[in-house]
Image: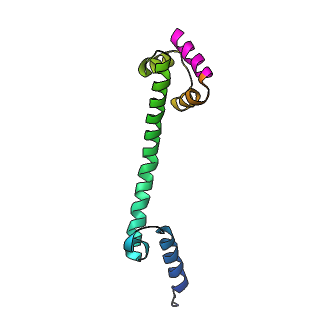
Amino acid sequence: MPRVKRGTVRTKKRKSLLAKTKGYKWGRKKLVRAAKTAVKKAGQHALRDRRKKKRTMRALWQVRLNAAVREEGMTYSTFVHSLKKSHSELDRKVLAALAADEPTVFKAIVAKVKSA
């Protein structure tokens, strides 16, 4: 079997790994063994925080909706309960955006939900 020299492949692999660690502190940006573990750990954190971002955004929408609904004389929990009873297809993201950007439309939605 012929001998395989890995010079270019190995260099390319190492360069791409070290490119991913740009901006890291200490030896994790320039030492290959430390960089490998740093990149793997960073990927784990990135995956976890993409999930966490969805939770924090939903919490933000709830806070914004609560503030907007209280101006209309209702609480968040009663608003959401009435919204479910009226079979509305609007979710919290859309409602929070309406409350911030289109207050007249949001007031109409709240009035409709109150009557239901």
Residues 62 and 81: in front is 62
Q: Main secondary structure of the magenta part?
A: helix
* Residue at (53, 32) in percent of width and height: 93
Q: Of residues 29 and 67, which is closer to you in this image?
A: 67
Q: In the drawing, does residue 91 fall left or right of residue 105? A: left
79 w.r.t. 100: above or below? above
Residue at the bottom extreme, as displayed: 2
Residue 37 seen from this side: yes
Q: Is residue 102 above or below residue 115?
A: below
Residue lying furthest top in this view?
115
Task: Say which quarter of the image contains residue 108.
Answer: top right
Residue 104, image x, y percentages: 62, 20
89 is higher (above) or lower (below) than 43: above
The image shows residue 87 at horizontal and vertical percentages of: 54, 18
Span colored in magenta? 104-116
User: Residue 42: horizontal and vertical position, in percent?
Assistant: 42, 60
- As for residue 112 lying within the magenta part, the answer is yes
Name the residue: 58% across, 22% down. Answer: 106
Instruction: Tell me the residue at 55%/83% (across/down).
Output: 8
Q: From this viewpoint, is residue 116 visible? A: no
Q: Nearer the viewer, residue 2 or 15?
A: 15
